[in-house]
Amino acid sequence: MSPFPVLRTRGAKTAAMVVGLCWMVVLFDGLDMFVYGSVLPNMLAEKALGLTPGKGGDIGSYATFGMLVGALSAGTVTDWIGRKKVILTCTAVFSLASALCAVSTGLGTFGLGRFVAGLGLGGLLPTTITMVAEYAPRGRTALIVGTLMTAHQAGGILSGFVGIWTSQPGGWRVAYWICVVPLLLGVVPIAKWLPESLNFLLAKGRHQAARALATRYGIDLPAPRTERPAAKGHGDAVIALFRGNLWRTTLLFWLTSFFGLLLVYGVSNWLPTMARGAGYDLGSSLSFVVVINLGGIVGMLVAGRFSDRFGAPRVAMVWFAFTALGIALLDIRMPLALTYLDVFLTGLFLFSAQAMVYAAVAARSTDDNRATAVGWVSGMGRFGAVFGPWLGGQLVASRNETWGFAAFAIAAVLATVFVSLTGLRTPRTDTKSDPPLPLSALG
């Protein structure tokens, strides 16, 4: 059975191809992002490169700080030069940065590699979300975004296995060489087969290029969006997020994303280490990485279907609330089978809650500033992604690992509150809500 939803609308083959190609590079994105948490226990055990728990938290934050810069920059650049070029560039950047980590002889070089990798990782995710949202069939935006995000969790699962396979002394270098594979397997297929966004071409007035692309793939052109004034310049796309009454919703989504990504990256980086501090052996601790990401894959598909029916903000609110409960229960020592169940359910709700924040923002945005809106909500959330790994490192360094579960549960409660204030309704203005234009519409 295909991992992608069945699409029965005109242009379904093209949409499936776009989702499939983006899914592949986001899989590598997830592997590169989560592999640090998977190899961290072994790096700490062998004191690789002089690493300590405190420094481990700092290194984890370098990558997320790079992602902050990458996300904020890529959104505006993507609305300027196009989705495809940014996807190609980001994939190449984080792959080459992993090679730098693999050959590092000191923490300075390793930290630089993680920061540069973060630039590519931070730019790739919001750009691919924008791309698949713009090719999604009518009424399927949240499901398609959720499907894409399963790749991120699949990358997390793969990172858990990579951590297990490379647990021998010095094996962390092998793990980072594995993360160079996207340069070979991702860049060429994207360059050859991924089409540019039709919405981007139309928003830029490149009607002839849009018509040629639509003719090539046998798809309809999306209708132009007119309900908001178009952004005229690169900075204007950001300013447009605050016009009228939008400033309140924009800030609330930013705050939700801050706490959502604090959870995603704090838990992803420190779950194995905090689990060991709570008394679980190394094998079980690394298995938690696999289990939580398996839950994330299921959660993405379930949340996507629910969000297309009930609204992405409403689903994100409920999902964050269950995340708080699941993380809080991790602070209680239970039989191993129950712990695995709790980790699975926590992953089911945690990762898809944040993904539905992206889906909601994409659905509420216009064609000319969608990448900017998604990029900035992702980028502002990266402040939380920087803080989460740092916080986990400080708690582990002070031997207060179990307090980490309580801190992350509180973050989930705050995310629940902020997303509930956004209005809990996704307007019927997603990229496919307007009727498509026939190819003759542009002359």
Image (spheres, grey):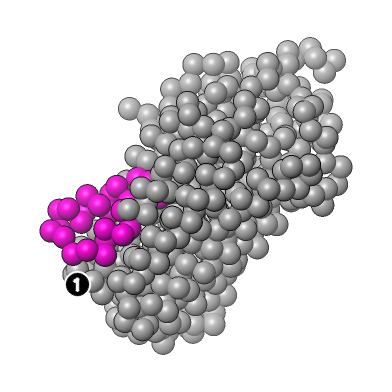
Q: Is residue 335 left or right of residue 378?
A: left
- Toward the left, the furthest residue is 335
127 within the magenta span: no
Task: Name the one closer to the observer, 48 or 390.
Answer: 390
Residue 275 horizontal/vertical position (percent): 26, 68
Q: Residue at x 86, y 42 (%)?
A: 232
Q: Residue at x 45, y 60 (%)?
A: 411
How many residues crowd around disc 1 within 10 Å: few (fewer than 14), some, or many (20 or more)? few
207 shown above or below 389: above
The answer to whether 180 is drawn above or below residue 212 in the figure is below
Q: Quadrant of the N terminus?
A: top left
Res. 364 visible in picture? yes
Type of amino acid at the residue the image marks with label 1: Gly
Magenta residues, start to end: 326-352
Q: Verify whether residue 340 appears in magenta.
A: yes
Pick the residue in front: 376 or 36: 376
Q: Secondary structure at mark 1?
A: loop
Observer able to see residue 79 = no
User: Which residue is label 1 attached to?
Assistant: 279
Image: 276 above or below 160? below
Q: Position of residue 308 (x, y in %)?
A: 50, 28
Q: Position of residue 185 (x, y in %)?
A: 49, 48
Does 329 sit left or right of 34 as displayed? left
Report the side of 169 relative to 70 (left or right).
left
**Residue 276: image location, x then y, percent:** 24, 72
Residue for point 43% across, 82% down: 54
